[in-house]
Image (cartoon, rainbow, N blue to C red):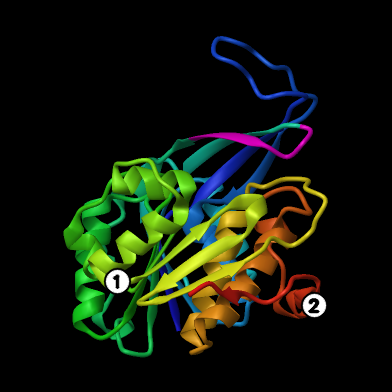
């Protein structure tokens, strides 16, 4: 079972000719409201990958909160432990340009009220994979990770958005997933992604995965380093790619798939998520990923 402890946010989407510079106003022809948030997106990605998913988050008592919960319920995700908070539902302003690059501003809203004690102990077992990101309060993530580890659950942390976290949290993490910027922010130093991943893996005894955009991804586990390329695609929108990667990889590891198998499937799903607009709408289903696995060579063992 996958338990996602994380954010639920409504994306206010803008399709722009170009992304705004400081002080610039860019007029867009239209606007959209779409369900999003890294937590909710990853829950949907895992569910579409075939996992049984419980989502624990917080939304407001407003129509935007209803929109988010309806989208998750449509994926047969368990929402029994979601908080309806006395705060506005979180929103994000997402601008995407003609080549698929994006800028995002996030207002946390109800997500800032999320607490680790919303997760009942019955969900934290050796048969559970807990998936978390950094769009909700980090102290609550740290508290839940400690409880999960103590109860034998596997902990997957997506280090997004980029920020420093304590070694106390990292010592409870089994799989750390980040992009190049996030890896550098956590390490507090510039460097090659492979070196950063190796240092984090050795220092905290975890699997360190770094996504590299169009160059694929690498994963470091103990003395093994795996590298996979990126699926060849025509990019429409990159917003959901990272969440597709995390959700699918967590689902594969939850079903005890070997690391290179999980890395391969996650990379294919991430590429497919770039081929359509929006976050959740672009997340692929398991059967469609099956049909594209042959388009990307499997991971190779570097050492």
Q: Position of residue 20 (x, y in %)?
A: 63, 19
* Residue at mark 2 to residue at mark 1: CA–CA distance: 39 Å
From what the image shows, is residue 197 above or below residue 255?
A: above
Q: Is residue 217 visible?
A: yes
Magenta span contains residue 160: no
Residue 202: x %, y % from top left = 28, 68
Query: What is the number of the mark on residue 302?
Result: none
* 269 relative to 220 in the view: left or right: right
What residue is shown at x 46% (from left), y 53% (from top)?
193
Q: Dot 2: few (<14), some (14–19), or many (≥20) neighbours within 10 Å? A: few
* Magenta region: 98-105
Where residue 294 is drawn, which disc sits there?
2
Q: Which residue is mark 1?
A: 119
- Residue under the image location 33 percent in, 82 percent down: 123
Residue at image location 22% in from the left, 61% down from the top: 169
Determine the image quadrant of residue 16: top right
Query: Quadrant location of residue 139?
Result: bottom left
The residue under the point 76% across, 80% down is 290
């Amino acid at each position: 079972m996958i338990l996602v402890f994380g954010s639920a946010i409504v994306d206010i989407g803008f399709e722009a000719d170009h992304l705004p510079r400081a002080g610039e106003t860019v007029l867009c022809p239209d606007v959209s409201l779409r369900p999003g948030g890294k937590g909710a997106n990853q829950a949907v990605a895992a569910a579409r990958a075939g996992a049984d998913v419980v989502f624990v988050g917080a939304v407001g008592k407003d129509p935007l909160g209803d929109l988010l919960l309806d989208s998750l319920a449509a994926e047969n995700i368990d929402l029994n432990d979601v908080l309806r908070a006395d705060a506005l539902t979180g929103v994000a302003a997402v601008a995407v340009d003609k080549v698929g690059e994006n800028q995002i501003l996030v207002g946390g809203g109800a997500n800032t009220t999320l607490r680790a004690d919303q997760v009942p102990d019955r969900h934290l077992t050796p048969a559970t994979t807990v998936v978390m990101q950094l769009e909700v309060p980090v102290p609550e993530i740290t508290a839940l990770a400690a409880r999960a580890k103590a109860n034998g659950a596997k902990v997957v942390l997506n280090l997004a958005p980029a920020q420093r976290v304590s070694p106390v949290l990292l010592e409870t993490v089994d799989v750390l997933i980040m992009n190049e910027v996030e890896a550098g922010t956590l390490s507090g130093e510039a460097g090659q992604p492979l070196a950063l991943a190796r240092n984090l893996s050795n220092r905290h005894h975890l699997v360190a995965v770094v996504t590299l955009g169009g160059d694929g991804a690498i994963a470091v586990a103990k003395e093994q380093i795996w590298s996979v390329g990126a699926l060849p695609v025509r990019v429409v929108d990159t917003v959901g790619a990272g969440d597709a990667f995390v959700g699918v990889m967590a689902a594969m590891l939850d079903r005890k798939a070997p690391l290179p198998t999980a890395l391969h499937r996650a990379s294919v799903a991430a590429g497919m998520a770039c081929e359509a607009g929006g976050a959740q709408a672009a997340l692929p289903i398991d059967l469609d990923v099956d049909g594209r696995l042959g388009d990307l060579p499997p991971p190779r063992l570097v050492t």
